[in-house]
Amino acid sequence: MSYADEKILKAINEIEKQEVKKLEDGIEIDDILYTFSEQFFFDNRVSIMAPDQFIEMPQKLAEIKYPSANRPKIILTDKETGGHNVTLNLVENPGADDFMSELVKGVKSIIKKTQPSNIFYEEGIEKINGKNVGWFDYKGFAIDTQIYYFQFFAGVDNKTLFGAVNCPDNERVVWAPIAKQIMKSLKIHNK
C-alpha cells in the first residue's frame, strides 16, 4: 500500500469515528443533497437504502461499463455522470451464510488474480439484521481513472447476494462511509 493510500485510509477511519450523518437525514455532496429511501429488489426479497436521485442505468451504458454478460441485474447510477453506482446481483450459490469468510477470501482472490494492480484496504463480516454479511473494499484501475469499490455479500435463500457501491477513487473519503451505511441497511425479507 502506498503512502498516499495509507493517508487516505487513515482519513476515512477518522471520518468514520466522527458522527456520520445518517442516510435517512440526507447527505450533501458537492452541493447535491442526496436523499435515501428503502428500495426493494428481487421480488421484494431484498431491500437497501439507496439514493433517490439514482436511476436504473440505461442498458447501452450498462453494456459499456459492465461488458461481461454476467453484469449485475440491478445497476443504479447517478444521472449526471454514471460514475457513482450501486449494484446488486443474486446468483445461485447455496450456503453463503455457512461459509462467508471463505466467500470473501475467494472473491478477493479472484479479483487479485485478474487485476493484480488493485489495492485492497479492509474486510470484515458483520451481523446485519440477523444475517452474516461479508465485505471488503479496494481501489481498482480503469483505462483512464481509478475507482473505489465497496463489495458486500449475503445469503438469500439458496442464493448469494453480491452488492457493490463504486465511485471515482478521489471521492472515496466521502463515499466509503455511505457505502458501509448502504450495506448496513440491507434487509432480507421473508417470502
Image (cartoon, rainbow, N blue to C red):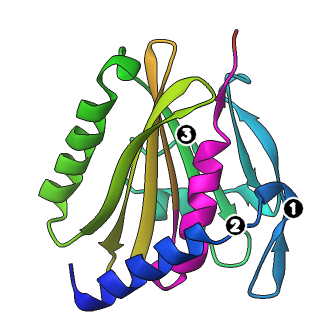
Q: Is residue 150 left or right of residue 17?
A: left
Q: Secondary structure at mark 2?
A: loop
The span from disc 2 to disc 1 (Cα, nearest Å) is: 11 Å
Q: Secondary structure at mark 3?
A: loop
Binning the other alpha carbons within 10 Å of mark 1 as few (below 14), some (14 to 19) or many (20 upward) gives few
Q: Amino acid at mark 1?
A: Asp
Magenta stretch in the rendered image:
166-189
Q: Which mark is residue 20?
A: 2
* Image location of residue 40, percent across then percent down: 75, 34
| Image quadrant in which you'd find residue 149 | bottom left
Q: Amino acid at mark 2?
A: Val
Binning the other alpha carbons within 10 Å of mark 3 as few (below 14), some (14 to 19) or many (20 upward) gives some
Q: Is residue 85 left or right of residue 44?
A: left
Residue plotted at (73% across, 52% down): 50
Residue plotted at (64% across, 51% down): 182
Is 27 or 19 nearer to us in this picture?
19
Q: Secondary structure at mark 1?
A: helix
* Image location of residue 153, percent across then percent down: 44, 37
* Image location of residue 123, percent across then percent down: 34, 52
- Tell whether position 179 is magenta: yes
Secondary structure mostly seen in the magenta stretch: helix
